[in-house]
Amino acid sequence: MAKKVAVVAVGGNSLILDPKKVTVEDQYLAAAETSKHIADMIEAGWDVAVGHGNGPQVGFILRRSEIAAKTEGMHEVPLDVCGADSQGAIGYALQQTLQNELIQRGIKKSVATVVTQVKVDKNDKAFQNPTKPIGGFMEEDDAKRREKELGWNVVEDAGRGWRRVVASPIPKEVVEIEAVKELLRAGTVVITVGGGGIPVVDDGKGGCVGAAAVIDKDFASSLLSQEINADLFVISTAVEKIAINYGKPDQKWIDKMTVAEAKKYIEEGHFAKGSMLPKVQAIIWFLENGGKQALVTDPPHIGAALRGETGTWIVP
Ligand code: ADP
Ligand code: MG
């Protein structure tokens, strides 16, 4: 590949700008905003594969499924299928808004979404101790019935009711990776591993079967970056830079850090679990497997960060 390839992981929250404005129209406006910044990258000469989160969106899909099952007797939608639905819908929003942006700028490039499965290990220890809450709250008897009949793991959530919890295993393999590479080689902008990918496990016959789990989108995007030998791994989130002593009086923004420094900061507890920690861990994973450089910034600063003016750069 002559051009340089970047993976951009877009946070699920930057696709919903205001938690009070979540209509499909609002989500399109947010996608259009993000697309402008991705188009800046493409205009600067990068070939791009886009990964994205789906937390809020998959929550809405699950909620609709639960309500429709309760009140209308509709079938419920299994978690892996909710993931597929979210990849399709978010992929559509991004591919349409990004394609429109490229047309406006006179850039001849097509954009396509690949519904992507990501293999996880059946024996991943995360399956023994599922911790990721998913779906709405339930009454105790409903939760216990589902536990017995459907094999769900359920927990009492801080006095607010019962919730289902699922595992968040480590991604092992992007099943559709060859298709993704083909599209990139053809110059297509690819949207893939949405929501961390649809988790699947070995079916024992060389194929795959859906798993009730969720994969961290930062880890899945890191795996994608490794599998396509990306020249750059960008995590686009809600902050312009990573900080140490984040939110404290002695907070300090980081312009550049090495893997060794990042590990030291992790040890010292600078990165919050469930938000910045998985991002830094995903980046370390990429850089320890041949990656050359990674960047964390927010969408409006992607252009300036690529010119070396801002963002946090992480290097081996
Ligand atoms: P995304 O939807 O992009 O995955 P997250 O909310 O999971 O976003 O993670 C980004 C958030 O991490 C930031 O908005 C910030 O509030 C938080 N954060 C935690 N620790 C740090 C840190 N050390 N430096 C910067 N941001 C941090
Ligand atoms: Mg996150």
Image: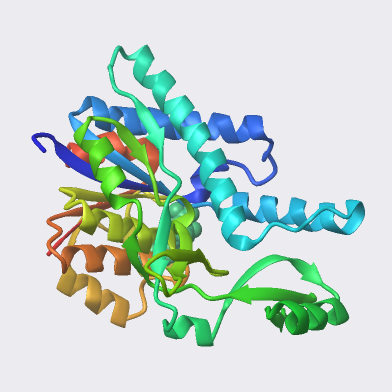
- 114 over 118 or under it: above or below: above
* Quadrant location, ligand no. 1: bottom left
Q: Is residue 213 left or right of residue 149?
A: left
Report the residue at 12% width, 56% height from top: 292
Residues 162 and 117: in front is 117
- Would you say 16 lies left or right of 315 here? right
At x 8% / y 35%, what residue is drawn?
2
The location of residue 60, given as percent across then percent down, is 69, 51
Q: Nearer the viewer, residue 4 or 296?
A: 4
Residue 175: give x, y in percent of width and height.
35, 57
Pick the front one: 88 or 249:
88
User: In x, y percent, where is residue 111?
Assistant: 37, 29
The answer to whether residue 166 is visible is yes
Q: Residue furthest front?
A: 205
Q: Residue at x 42, y 51 (%)?
A: 116
Whether 111 is drawn above or below 134: the answer is above
Q: Position of residue 255 (x, y in %)?
A: 21, 54
Identify the residue at image location x=24%, y=25%. Answer: 43
Q: Quadrant of the C terminus?
A: bottom left
